[in-house]
Image: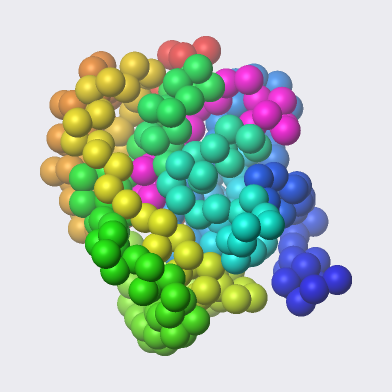
Amino acid sequence: MDSFSLEQQRRSDSDSRFIDCNGFRVHYKLYGSGKPPYLVLLHGSFLSIRSWRDVTASLSKEATVLVFDRPAFGLTSRPVPLPGNEARYSPEAQSDLIVALMDKLGFERAVLAGNSTGGTLALLTALRHPGRVQGLVLVGAMIYSGYANSEVPSFMKPFMKLMSLVFSRLMKLMITRLYDGNIRGFWHVKSRLSDETLAAFRADLMVGDWSRCFWELFLETHRLGFKKRTASVKVPTLVVTGEHDLTVKTEESFRLVREIAGAELLVIPDCAHLPQEEQPEAFVKGVQTFMRRLC
């Protein structure tokens, strides 16, 4: 057994589960009765399924809830993409992974709720696999700006791939130094994020060869053209923004509501980029109200 598998065993919780899917050994948790409606929660970058810890129990009273660590984060395995394996970190590959997990768990259709870059993937999945998405909850979703919609210039990518070991080490130094301040910036009231929880998030990220795998994810990030595609979203959508979100500014969420036909808006007061963390009761109430109208 390799060192990462040992770490998975050592750090997993009593309700942790693992499943092989699309080249990854995915860490996930499942809550609720196992029957429809199904709700899939997609965390943001540099976080993990820990980000949903205060809402899963309440949400699972009315839905079967799936949370999983996205590739490059948490206790999901972090293989380096090679010709002999399936593991890929592109947005499209991550979107396909969501649907593949649904297949393995027997979810015919699900509501996808994504926070930050998790919202990017939720929207992309609705565009690529519309028959599998019953509804969208886009929480501070990174749609129009931010690194999830940037890309490495094509002429530089071969060199950057060749120098992956060097660049991933530089990225490791940068992320390690800036991590705590960056994560605290997701909160409106910084004191709500305890030192213990911050340390746990940090430990969730920095497992195994984490910087190399995040580098692979970064290299595969590219512009998704959402500015021209949001109008084609046909599933019921709830857009959620924290009143004080500075990571994905509230104006971008307002724009998203205007561009998706029939979309609803929920502004949650007294919180920033992570409403499910700072205002879990208001978040649960908004999601449950939305889902009741779908089912």
Give me the residue at 37% from left, 83% from top. 174
Image quarter in which the N terminus is found: bottom right
Residue pictured at 76% horizontal, 76% vertical: 3
Magenta span contains residue 117:
yes
- Name which quarter of the figure residue 2 lies in: bottom right
Instruction: Pick the residue in front: 275 or 139.
Output: 139
Placement of 224 over or under 50, stated as above or below: above
- x, y percent for residue 162: 44, 75
What's the residue at 43%, 14% (across, down)? 293
On the image, the x and y values in percent for residue 39 come to 56, 31
Extent of the magenta region = 102-120
For this rendering, which residue is in front, 117 or 276? 117
The answer to whether residue 148 is seen in the rendering is yes
Please tell me whether residue 172 is drawn above or below residue 48 in the rendered image: below
Residue lying farthest to the right in this orientation: 1
Q: How many marks?
A: 0
Q: Percent x, y for residue 205?
A: 54, 70
Q: Quadrant of residue 240?
A: top left
Front residue (pair 219, 63): 219
What residue is at 58 percent from the left and 33 percent from the top? Answer: 99
How is the structure coloured here? rainbow
Q: Quadrant of residue 263?
A: top left
Q: Is residue 245 visible?
A: no
Is residue 282 found inside the magenta-colored segment of the image? no
116 left or right of 258? right
Residue 75 at x, y percent in the picture: 66, 62
